[in-house]
Image (cartoon, grey):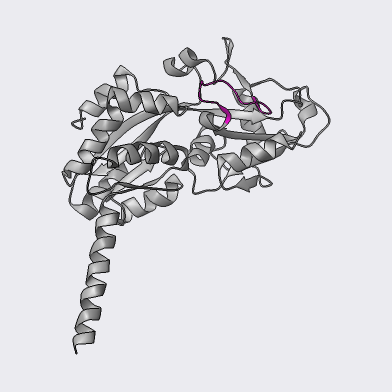
Amino acid sequence: MKFILFTVLFLLSCAKQNAEKLALTFKGSNTSSEVVNMLAKIHNKSKIKKIQVIGGGSEEAINEFISGDLFYLNSSRKLNPEEIQQVERVNDKKVKEVIFALDAIALIVNPKLGVHELNLTQISEILQGKIKNWKELGGPNLEITIYGRKNSSGTCHFIKEKFAPNGFATNIVEKNNSNEIVRAVKSDLSAFSYVDLKSISNKDHFPKRGIWAINIAIEGGNSVSPFERLVVLSGQYPLSRPLYQYIVDFEDPIISDFIKFELSDIGQDLIEREGFFKILPMQKALNREFGY
C-alpha cells in the first residue's frame, strides 16, 4: 500500500513539473527559436522559474496553440482573426500579439549560376513550376531544382501565400531547416530556394560566402536586395516581415517580464546582433495596444 501511494505521489509530482514546464514554454518558428532561446537564457539567469524555448516550425505549434496544448507561441506568420478566436474560446482568456523583431526572406541561388535578378512574376513562375529551366531566365541550360521547407514551416506558408497560392511545383525538394537548404544550394548549380536572411548573414549583416541572394526587380522601380537595410525597414523589399509571439493572457509576471526584456533597448540590440532587425515605431505602437 505504501509503495502504491509513493508511486501515485511521484507521478503527480512529475505531472506537476511537466505542467509547469509547459506553462513557461515558447514553441514554434525555427526562424526565431535560436534568438528567442538566447534571450531566454539571459533572462533566466535572474529567475527561479525558467522559460523554455522549442522550435519545430510555426504551423505545428499553431495547431497546438489553437487546441489549448500550448500557451506561448513563436510564429513567423501572423495569425488570422479566426485562429485567435479559437484560442480565446478554448482557454477563456484573451490572446496578446507581440512583434519582437523584423526579418527578411532571401531568395537564393548558387553564385556560379550567373542569374542575379528576378522579378516577382518570374519568382512566382519558378515556384509554381511554370519556368523549369534557367535558360529561360538568361542562365545556363539547367533544369531548376527548387529546395523548400516542409509544410510545418511558417516561412514556407509565407512564400506560398506570396508566390504560389495554388500550390508549389510538384518536384520541390523539402529540407528540414534553412541551414540544410543553404548547404544544398552551395553544392547545386541548378538550385533555387528561400531562407531567412540570418541564415546567409554574418554578425555584421554582411552576406556569407558561397551563396547569392537574388535581387528582386520591382515594377516601375529599382531592383532591391535583402541586404539593403533601409530598403528592408521601409518595407520596399517585398519579402520583409515581422516575427510574432502570441501569448495566452494568464497575467504571468515571468512571461510579462520576458516580453518586456525582448522589447527593451538591450533586448533589441541583442536581436539585431543575431542577424535580425529592431522593431520600428509602428510595431512599438501595435505592441502598446496589448500592454507592451
The residue most toward the front is 45
The location of residue 237, given as percent across then percent down, is 51, 19
Of residues 36 and 287, the one drawn nearer to the viewer in this rendering: 36
The location of residue 279, given as percent across then percent down, is 35, 23
How many numbered discs sit on the rendered protein? 0
* Left or right relative to 137: residue 180: left
Q: Residue at x 36, y 23 (%)?
A: 269
The residue most toward the bottom is 1
Asked whether residue 111 appears in the rendered view, the answer is: yes
Give above or below for 92 relative to 146: below
- Magenta range is 200-212
Of residues 257 and 87, the one drawn nearer to the viewer in this rendering: 257
The location of residue 249, given as percent across then percent down, is 19, 44
Image quadrant where residue 108 sits: top right
The residue most toward the top is 221
Q: Quadrant of the C terminus?
A: top left
Q: Quadrant of the N terminus?
A: bottom left
* Left or right relative to 282: residue 216: right
Of residues 111 and 11, the one drawn nearer to the viewer in this rendering: 11
Asked whether residue 168 appears in the rendered view, the answer is: no
Q: Residue at x 31, y 53 (%)?
A: 70
Q: Residue at x 29, y 33 (%)?
A: 98
Q: Is residue 235 magenta?
A: no
| Magenta-drawn stretch, dominant element (helix, strand or loop) | loop
Q: Residue at x 66, y 28 (%)?
A: 211
